[in-house]
Image: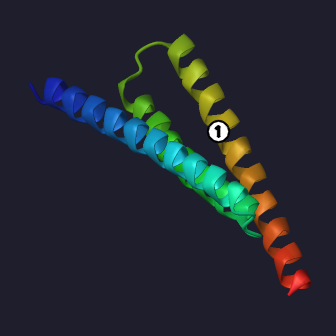
Amino acid sequence: MFHEWLNILVDAAILLFEFVGVLVIIASGIRGIIDYIRHEPLTRLNLAKGMAMGLEFKLGSEVLRTVIVREMSEIMIVASIIALRAALTFLIHWEIKNEQAEHREGL
């Protein structure tokens, strides 16, 4: 009974994190388009921050997914997805740091 309850809870949390991650990415994309049209100087920085936040939620859902995997092949797939999303998050944070440095130099 506890195992079933845990699976339901983890599945719900995974869906919630995935949904929030997608919403954050969509919202930051829309904001990025609006900022681009307005020629805002921090468009790339704001878009990168939004994408990073969305990826953090998506990464959290993948970590939760490791709780319910049963087979080694599933573990390898989830581990690959986690590694890919972690690499993307690292690259986006690197881009944010460079963009902030450029913005500070421009002031």
Colour scheme: rainbow
Viewer-nearest residue: 25 or 15: 25
Q: Residue at x 85, y 67 (%)?
A: 98
Q: Residue furthest left?
A: 1
Compared to 42, does 95 lie above or below? Answer: above
Compared to 69, does 64 lie above or below? Answer: below
Q: Is residue 101 left or right of residue 13?
A: right
**From where the camera sits, is residue 12 visible?**
yes
Q: Amino acid at mark 1?
A: Arg
Viewer-nearest residue: 54 or 44: 44
Q: Residue at x 16, y 23 (%)?
A: 4
Residue at which label 1 appears: 85
Q: Is residue 54 left or right of residue 12?
A: right
Where residue 88 sits: x, y (%)? 71, 43
Where residue 6 sits: x, y (%)? 21, 32
Where residue 13 sits: x, y (%)? 30, 39
Q: Residue at x 90, y 82 (%)?
A: 106
Q: Residue furthest front?
A: 38
Compared to 106, does 99 lie above or below? Answer: above
Q: Is residue 4 left or right of residue 67?
A: left
Q: Residue furthest bottom?
A: 107
| SS state under label 1 | helix
Quadrant housing the N terminus: top left
Q: Residue at x 32, y 39 (%)?
A: 16
Viewer-nearest residue: 40 or 8: 40
